Image (cartoon, coloured by chain):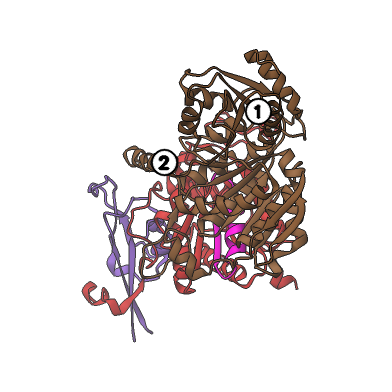
Chain colours: A red, B purple, C brown
């Protein structure tokens, strides 16, 4: 069969999500943020929620998330996204409210806001990208940086005697009574990305149904920060990140009940 | 047995040449251009072996920049 | 019409007035001397009547960022705190101003610096009127000197905040927050409907509909040329507020030889001092700025012309005195009387200060 016979609108099985804006994303080549943005844009469209969604963007690499996904957004101060989302949702209980946060945002400067929003069981979805490093500011140590991992502020590798231990914030959030769904996913393969999409869909459904706080952690890569090619980053992530941050559901109230 | 034909259309100017689609392709259809670059200087992806494509969308799903469209025909 | 007259604390009046104004949400954290605001709201359960959201947050940082999130959706939202807590809020206040969001913040001041004291003070004047947080921004600052004004300034604060899309602050002090006085509460107003919010606040996050582009509330702009334009727009708003919204109260200034400038609880004490002085034939007048920003520079300059001296009386080491000096351009001698650390002076001390600073005999 000729290419021009195949490339025909009737045969299209995958296209750029309608809610992803035309703007070229500012992320580095291979960055996991792009895949997650795409999944969120697809889901909001598929769930018919464009007119009903308010996103809360973080400070970090995803600070410009509002430039890419075509819904109403507010840009939070660093770490404060769950506090903003708390008020947005309580004042607009019918809305789909989600935060999009990195590891520094959620588990360093915003730990208090994150834990208390989750503990109150705010009906929001928290999408958390864990790439173990501060991307936007140039590759400094994050709370999630692995032991021995080199960053701009741990140039000889993270030492637990100096810098403490890598923080698995999702594991901690799963212990709180306010969370209904906490899961750790990845987007480095098509199969992983499909599972991540199901997880985010579930989180959005929980938020809409008022079941409590959902947290979807995406273990991702930061090629620039890790100083590896995107392909090598995926391999390094599988080998190192997944050991400390194993994929799978940490809490699923649906199943447990 | 049904034969599956696939094809992808890549937005070359949007592509950042990250190579993740190439890695994700189960039938080794895609490669990055060896010499040519797009306007932003990236070696963009292209179908090096179009006849091998089965339209599985793996490349498009892992593409961080949403620059791949996938087409699929099942010939009975 | 039967007026709804009550006897209550200033802090309680704020809570009642907030519900009656139709405020959509209050987010706060306990701190003396203003915890009665949150306590009263929780006791009144407005979520059962008007639908108002009341939430005790985990910190002042969270409170102000809840206000930021709520304000972004066009809702009338507020918080309250006292000095150390308001210091924590400065981040969010700067974001509110930069994102051009209306909101109301109440600061029932206590003595600082640091943890300081729980007793009354006016030592956050600089923080409130000159910035506090980072960047070139201004807060609309209302200084109540009675429980009635605590109630009235809730609606005034919100009205101004929405009119100019700028956060407003009620800058009270522990005296005004804690004292009980007669207050006439306003009529209950309905909260605005979703439709009214869409109309009044086209910029608000109400959900992206096909008839408009997505709304984004952000203070971030990496293009310096655009960021300068944004700043110029803020400054134009501030000029407009300065031109239209200066508020102050005069008392016996027409024939006065001396002027006292004082705000909040201090103005009440000074009012008594003016009356005492006039009993023995010393003509002192009082000017009480109601808006600390915009500050009544012109009014003070006009009123003080030809006077022998101005005493700026404050519960601090001398903060508003800088604005009074700017107002009169050194044409009139300006002196300061202040108490710190939570001490509230009596009228006699004010008069003694006139003797010490200006040689006035009583």
Residue A249 pos. (x, y %):
66, 63
Side (left or right) of C313 relative to C206: right
> Among all residues in the image, which is located at the extreme bottom?
B76
Answer with the quarter of the image where residue C266 lies: top right
In whole angstroms, how far apart are the C-alphas of marks 2 and 1?
26 Å
* Residue C126 versus residue A79 in the image, above or below: above
Residue at the disc numbered 2: C243
Q: Categorize mark 2 by other alpha carbons within 10 Å: few (<14), some (14-19), many (20+).
A: few
Q: Which of C282 and C62 is in front in this view?
A: C282
- Residue A85 covered by magenta stretch: yes
User: Magenta stretch?
Assistant: A77-100
User: Under tag 1, what secondary structure?
Assistant: strand
Residue at the disc numbered 1: C314
Q: Nearer the viewer, residue C101 or A4?
A: C101
What chain is tagged by disc 1?
C
Q: Same chain for marks 2 and 1? A: yes
């Amino acid at each position: 069969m000729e290419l021009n016979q195949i490339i025909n609108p009737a045969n299209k099985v995958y296209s750029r999500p309608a809610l992803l804006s035309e703007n070229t994303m500012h992320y580095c080549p291979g960055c996991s943020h792009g895949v997650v943005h795409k999944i969120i844009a697809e889901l909001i469209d598929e769930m018919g929620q464009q007119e009903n969604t308010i996103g809360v963007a973080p400070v970090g690499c995803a600070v410009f998330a509002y430039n890419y996904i075509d819904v109403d957004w507010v840009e939070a101060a660093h770490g404060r996204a769950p506090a903003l989302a708390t008020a947005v949702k309580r004042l607009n209980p019918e809305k789909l409210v989600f935060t999009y946060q990195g590891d520094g945002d959620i588990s360093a400067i915003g730990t208090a806001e994150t834990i208390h929003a989750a503990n109150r069981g705010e009906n929001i979805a928290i999408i958390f990208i864990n790439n173990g490093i501060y991307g936007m500011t140039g590759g400094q140590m994050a709370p999630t940086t692995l032991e021995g991992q080199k960053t701009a502020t741990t140039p000889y590798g993270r030492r637990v005697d100096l810098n403490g231990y890598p923080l698995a914030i999702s594991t901690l959030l799963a212990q709180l009574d306010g969370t209904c769904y906490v899961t750790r996913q990845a987007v480095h393969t098509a199969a992983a990305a499909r599972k991540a999409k199901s997880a985010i869909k579930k989180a959005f459904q929980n938020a809409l149904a008022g079941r409590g706080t959902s947290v979807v952690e995406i273990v991702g890569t930061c090629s620039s920060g890790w100083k590896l090619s995107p392909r090598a980053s995926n391999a390094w992530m599988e080998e190192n990140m997944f050991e400390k941050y194993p994929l799978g559901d940490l809490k699923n109230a649906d199943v447990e009940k | 047995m049904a034969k599956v034909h696939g094809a992808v259309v890549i937005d070359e100017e949007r592509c950042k040449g990250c190579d993740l689609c190439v890695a994700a392709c189960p039938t080794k259809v895609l490669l990055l251009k060896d010499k040519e670059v797009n306007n932003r200087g990236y070696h963009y992806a292209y179908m090096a072996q179009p006849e091998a494509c089965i339209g599985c969308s793996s490349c498009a799903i892992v593409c961080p920049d949403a620059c791949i469209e996938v087409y699929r025909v099942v010939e009975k | 019409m039967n007026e709804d007259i009550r006897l209550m604390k200033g802090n309680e009046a704020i809570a009642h007035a907030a519900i009656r104004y139709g405020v959509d949400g209050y987010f706060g954290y306990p701190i003396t001397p203003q915890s009665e605001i949150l306590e009263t709201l929780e006791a009144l359960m407005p979520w059962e009547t008007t639908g108002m959201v009341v939430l005790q947050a985990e910190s002042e940082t969270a409170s102000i960022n809840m206000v930021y999130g709520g304000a972004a959706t066009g809702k009338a939202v507020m918080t309250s705190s006292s000095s150390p807590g308001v210091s924590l809020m400065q981040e969010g206040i700067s974001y509110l101003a930069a994102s051009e969001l209306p909101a109301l913040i109440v600061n029932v001041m206590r003595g600082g610096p640091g943890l300081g004291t729980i007793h009354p003070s006016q030592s956050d004047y600089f923080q409130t009127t000159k910035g506090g947080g980072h960047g070139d921004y201004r807060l609309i600052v209302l200084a109540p000197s009675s429980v009635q004004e605590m109630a009235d300034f809730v609606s005034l604060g919100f009205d101004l905040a929405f009119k100019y899309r700028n956060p407003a602050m009620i800058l009270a002090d522990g005296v005004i927050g804690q004292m009980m006085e007669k207050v006439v509460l306003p009529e209950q107003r309905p909260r605005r409907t979703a439709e009214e919010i869409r109309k009044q606040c086209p910029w608000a996050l109400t959900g992206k509909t096909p008839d408009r582009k997505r709304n984004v509330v952000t203070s971030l702009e990496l293009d310096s040329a655009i960021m300068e334009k944004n700043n110029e727009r803020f400054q134009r708003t501030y000029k407009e507020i300065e031109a239209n919204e200066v508020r102050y109260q005069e008392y016996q200034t027409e024939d006065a030889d001396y002027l006292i400038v004082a705000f909040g609880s201090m103005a009440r004490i000074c009012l008594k001092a003016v009356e005492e002085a006039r009993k023995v034939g010393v003509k002192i007048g009082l000017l009480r700025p109601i808006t600390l920003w915009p500050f009544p520079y012109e009014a003070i300059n006009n009123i003080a012309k030809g006077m022998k001296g101005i005493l700026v009386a404050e519960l601090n080491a001398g903060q508003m005195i800088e604005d009074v000096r700017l107002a009169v351009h050194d044409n009139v001698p300006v002196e300061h009387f202040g108490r710190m650390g939570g001490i509230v002076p009596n009228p006699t001390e004010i008069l003694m200060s006139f003797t010490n600073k200006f040689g006035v005999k009583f």
